[in-house]
Image: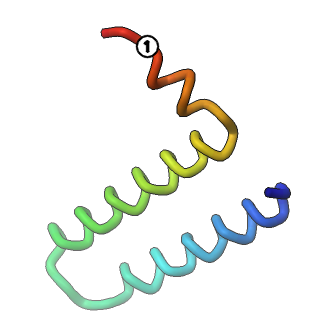
Amino acid sequence: MSIITVLITLVVVGFVMWLINRIPMQRTIKTIVNVVVVIVVVVWLFKLFGLWAYLSNIKV
């Protein structure tokens, strides 16, 4: 996947987040949606750049 595709995807996700935050709803629901989207995007980026396998091998 090219860096342009990654940037376009991040811009689209940011725009969707902005649209979701413009909708009047409870603050807690907005916070939960924002946290879930950020976690999904971070995990996607980790998998995309190959860091997910490295992080999954860390023993706690």
Colour pattern of the rendering: rainbow
Quarter of the C terminus within the rendering: top left
Residue at 37% x, 79% y: name it: 21
Residue at 66% x, 69% y: name it: 9
Amino acid found under the numbered disc labelled 1: Ile
Residue 7 in the image: state x and y as whole percent: 74, 63
- What is the count of numbered marks? 1
Which of the 4 quarters of the picture holds residue 54? top right
Residue 5 in the image: state x and y as whole percent: 78, 66
Instruction: From the viewer's perspective, tell me whether residue 1 is left or right of residue 45.
Output: right
Relative height, residue 48 to residue 32 (above, below)? above
Q: Residues within 10 Å of mark 1 (few under 14, many from 20)?
A: few
Which of the 4 quarters of the picture holds residue 37? bottom left
Quarter of the N terminus within the rendering: bottom right
Relative height, residue 45 to residue 14 (above, below)? above
Extreme-bottom residue of the structure? 23
Relative height, residue 13 to residue 46 (above, below)? below
Instruction: From the viewer's perspective, tell me whether residue 30 is left or right of residue 46.
Output: left
Which of the 4 quarters of the picture holds residue 11? bottom right
Residue 36 in the image: state x and y as whole percent: 33, 59
According to the image, label 1 marks what residue?
A: 58
Residue 20 in the image: state x and y as whole percent: 38, 82
- Label 1 SS: loop
Extreme-top residue of the structure? 59
Residue at 40% x, 51% y: name it: 39
